[in-house]
């Protein structure tokens, strides 16, 4: 199995690039952001609670997203591998993911970290906000908050994977196809 984490700040292009990796390597896409938005669309209790936090740019509690990932992982016993997008976002989530994958004897192969300058992140999210319909993509204050939550709570995960020699920084600036080939070349070299 090929298990990859596609990592990076909001607006780094994780969702876009995940599609290329899925196509090239036949992976199952697990995006906690997408799963949460499905809960919101279905107007579940979980979705309503999550929306309040997401609209403020804050993280949803660890146990909620860990449970979602466990369920989705278990639903695909046939998978060639998984691409984790937007998860883990805290060290506690990274540890829980390791436990889940150890239990299934299929560890993370690499954590691919897209590196993008802050102003470019804001521009990309505002551009996406014109069509995404996402309330957290519309307002610069909320976007800034999401980036600051990433820097405080999520970026420290890099050290967690560095300690396992699994952290691969990838230049996330430039054309979508150029970034996709950087990612693909890195995965092929693993
Ligand atoms: P995303 O689509 O990955 O940008 O996520 C949108 C929002 O969903 C985030 O700003 C968080 O509020 C929430 N979210 C998504 N994934 C996670 C996660 N792994 N842990 C906590 N909150 C999350």
Image (cartoon, rainbow, N blue to C red):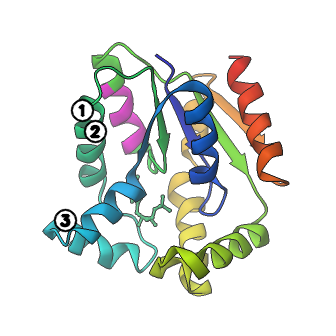
Q: Which is more toward the observer, 126 or 49? A: 126
Q: Which residue is label 1 attached to?
A: 75
Q: Which mark is residue 46?
A: 3
Q: Is residue 111 visible?
A: yes
N-term mark: 3 or 2: 3
Q: Is 165 positioned to the left or the right of 180 in the image?
A: left
Position of 53 with respect to 86 (left or right) is left
Mark 2 and mark 1 in contact (Cβ < 8 Å)? yes
Total numbered circles: 3
Q: Quadrant of ligand 1?
A: bottom left
Judged from the image, the secondary structure of the residue bearing numbered disc 3 is helix
Q: Which residues are magenta?
A: 93-100
- Identify the residue at the far front of this view: 23
Mark number displayed over residue 72: 2
- Image coordinates of residue 88 in percent, x first then y, are 44, 45
Is residue 3 positioned above or below 87 on the image?
above
Residue 7 position (above or below residue 184) = below
Residue 186 in the figure: left or right of residue 24: right
């Amino acid at each position: 199995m090929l298990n990859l984490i596609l990592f990076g700040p909001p607006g780094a292009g994780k969702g876009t690039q995940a599609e290329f990796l899925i196509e090239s390597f036949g992976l199952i896409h697990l995006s906690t952001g997408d799963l949460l938005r499905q809960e919101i669309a279905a107007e579940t209790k979980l979705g309503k609670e999550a929306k309040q936090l997401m609209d403020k740019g804050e993280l949803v509690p660890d146990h909620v997203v860990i449970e979602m990932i466990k369920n989705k992982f278990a639903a695909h016993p046939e998978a060639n591998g998984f691409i984790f997008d937007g998860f883990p976002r805290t060290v506690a989530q990274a540890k829980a993911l390791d436990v889940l994958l150890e239990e299934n004897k299929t560890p993370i192969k690499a954590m691919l970290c897209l590196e993008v300058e802050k102003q470019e992140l804001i521009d990309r999210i505002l551009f996406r906000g014109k069509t995404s319909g996402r309330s957290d993509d519309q307002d610069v204050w909320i976007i800034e908050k999401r980036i600051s939550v990433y820097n405080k709570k999520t970026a420290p995960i890099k050290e967690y994977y560095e300690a396992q020699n699994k952290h691969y920084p990838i230049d996330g600036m430039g054309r979508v196809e150029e970034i996709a080939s950087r990612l693909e070349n890195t995965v092929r070299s693993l």
